[in-house]
Amino acid sequence: MRTIDDLTTELGSLSGKRILVRSDLNVPLDKETGAVTDDGRIRASLPTWQRLLDAGAKVVVVAHLGRPKGVPEEKYSLAPAVERAKELLPGVNVTLAADTVGESARAAVAALGDGELLVLENLRFNAGETSKDEAERGAFADELAALSDGYVSDGFGVVHRKQASVYDVAQKLPHAAGGLVLAEVEVLKRLTETPQRPYAVVLGGSKVSDKLGVIDNLLNTADRLLIGGGMVFTFLKAQGHEVGKSLLEEDQLDTVRGYIERAKERGVELVLPVDVVAAAAFAADAEHDVVAADAIPADRLGLDIGPESGKLFAAKLADCQTVFWNGPMGVFEMEPYSHGTRAVAQALVDSDAFSVVGGGDSAAAVRTLGFDEKGFGHISTGGGASLEFLEGKTLPGLTVLES
Ligand code: ADP
Ligand code: MG
């Protein structure tokens, strides 16, 4: 992949050059105050920005937040992320344009000094960013390209997307992968090419249908597959157990039965919870008890794996050399259902394995539950991107950086 060194050679020097950086600033915001609740992605973006600033570039950052529908919407403004970035970059002049490629953006880019950083407003305020129509996307990419002399792709969380700021603009400007993208790819290669064994994969989160491709592929490479979170109920049901009102994807039962078969054939150890925290409602203050995984009452829903399962999962991870974890074990946002996720995180901190945490919610869970990031081998900034990489797919945003 092309690096910032290659880009520097191509441009002669970065000093005084306008460098467009696609970063991932899609951070969770507090519903009441609007403040950033987990700044992991902002902090992960800093080293590349800093490197370009140090080289005297005029740094123009583009990013998205949430899912606006192609028009500006105040609640999706990048302002809270930029406020946090300012705190993290003391001594750097950091500003936010009022639009993405309009009058405000053009004027702000023109006024930008060397070693200063400008963030353009949410990319997805423009329909061209995510359009399926090549021409519409291309036209928007042209507007972005007009604001810059070179392009650095550093938003790992979006490299699996064929979007204007990720895919199209790279083809219109001298380009390079940023340090974050390079680091993420290196880690994922360690998981796909030569994982040290035993290699365990822990999967959770909400829906099994989000993760079919990756399960399919991991059944070829992993030694153990541990399943928790909302998706586990489709597995339990596939094994003939009743799951009450728990999250269940009836239409995936056959697929999951197929996975259980293949795991057996290939000698992949499939580890399911033995107990579950079953609640009367989807609420932190709902009545809840620990029940056996094969005895979930009809009027209850499983919101976490139980304490015995936490111990079982920890034991299954203890001797591993490599672990990939995607998806919380329960509804960790509510304290009573956070213990399973906590148990898995602690098991990874305690183990000597090279551990990779992938997934936006999983990474946020690890941090909001108070774990030190240093306890893990790597916390990925990209959920979907890391899953698609592990699935063996080609990621359009990486392909364009190859030549
Ligand atoms: P990631 O972003 O790490 O890939 P997902 O987006 O797949 O993870 O899933 C995260 C969500 O899954 C969390 O918001 C969590 O509340 C939810 N979840 C976990 N366990 C359950 C469960 N038993 N029932 C319903 N939702 C669950
Ligand atoms: Mg998620």
Image: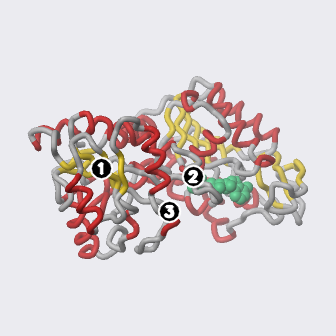
Residues tagged 2 and 3 counted as in contact (Cβ below 8 A): no
Between 38 and 265, the residue placed more toward the observer is 38
> Horizontal placement of 38 versus 400: left or right?
right
Q: Residues within 10 Å of mark 2 (few under 14, many from 20)?
A: some
Residue type at mark 2: give it: Ala
Residue type at mark 3: give it: Gly
The image quadrant where one finds the N terminus is top left
Q: Quadrant of ligand 1?
A: bottom right
Residue type at mark 1: give it: Val
Q: CA distance from mark 2 to mark 3?
A: 14 Å
The residue beneath circle 1 is 21
> Please, what secondary structure does the residue beneath circle 3 have?
loop
- The residue positioned 21% from the left and 59% from the top of the image is 147
- The residue positioned 56% from the left and 35% from the top of the image is 323
Between discs 2 and 3, the one toward the N terminus: 2
Residue 367 to residue 145: above or below? above
Q: Quadrant of residue 121?
A: bottom left
Between discs 3 and 1, the one toward the N terminus: 1
> Horizontal placement of 291 versus 327: left or right?
right
Q: Is residue 232 visible?
A: no
Between 321 and 48, the residue placed more toward the observer is 48
- Place of residue 5 in the rendered image (x, y in percent of width and height, measured from the top left): 19, 36
> Please, what secondary structure does the residue beneath circle 1 have?
strand
Q: Is residue 36 visible?
A: yes
- The residue positioned 57% from the left and 44% from the top of the image is 363
The residue beneath circle 2 is 35
